[in-house]
Amino acid sequence: MASYALVRSANFLLVVASIYFSPSSGVSQDVLATICGQTQNQETCEKTLQSDPRTISADPPILSLISLELTMKQVDMNFNAFSQFRDNTSDLALKIAFESCVTLYQNMKDILRADYKLSQQGKYDRITDLGQLTTLAYNCENGIPSSISPTAGITEDMLLIAQTAVYTNSYVAGS
Ligand SMILES: *[C@@H]1O[C@H](CO)[C@@H](O)[C@H](O)[C@H]1NC(C)=O
């Protein structure tokens, strides 16, 4: 009886130890909350990161890559959308504004490509320009001469994923 209880409590300790000390247990909900709590929309940030199946078992380096890949995906989507808006409109002022957005999003692609390389090399402290993505997305949207912007939604999505990447990578740099 006594030895049975001993085995049981030893098993219990092992389970507890593996939860708390396993080096490969991945990012916890606490880590996601720490990162996403700094963005304007914690819930969307967490959902976005969790949309990648690797997140649940990701260590910080993988989480950095995931955040950058998700940001690149949104930048590519917006780049294509702004290109289409530019090609579709016959309003010259709008065409110029959308063309400027295409250029800004090309800059964002270049920034992300360089940061992705730094992340792969583990040089997280050199990933310092992700905040610029927010500025460039604002510059694009603010240039559109329309009271009801057709692109406000995708700009909003871009701002949020950019914030997610900023705080993910500053977390990884400090961890
Ligand atoms: C642009 O025009 C094409 C062809 O008519 C259409 O399929 C596409 O949805 C349009 N894109 C936008 C962003 O309006």
Image: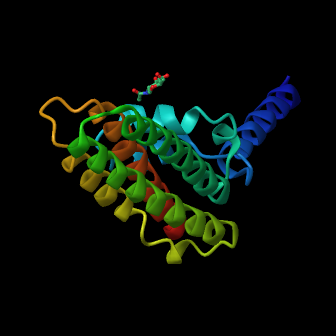
Between residue 93 and residue 28, name the one nearer to us.
Answer: 93
Percent position of residue 114, x then y: 58, 69
Q: Is residue 108 left or right of residue 37?
A: right
**Quadrant hosting ligand 1:** top left
**Viewer-nearest residue: 53 or 160:** 160
Residue 105 in view here: yes
Q: Nearer the viewer, residue 152 or 168?
A: 152
In the rendered image, which quarter is residue 153 located in?
top left
Question: Relative to the observer, which residue lies in front, 12 or 154?
Answer: 154
Q: Is residue 80 left or right of residue 135?
A: right
Q: Quadrant of the C terminus?
A: bottom right
Residue name at image x 16 percent, y 42 percent: 145
Q: Name the spot of residue 96 as percent of width and height, x first.
A: 28, 50
Is residue 140 shown above or below 148? below
Visible residue check, residue 171: no
Q: Is residue 119 left or right of residue 34?
A: right
Task: Work out whether 115 lies above or below 158.
Answer: below
**Image quadrant where residue 160 sits:** top left
The residue located at (21%, 50%) in the rendering is 143
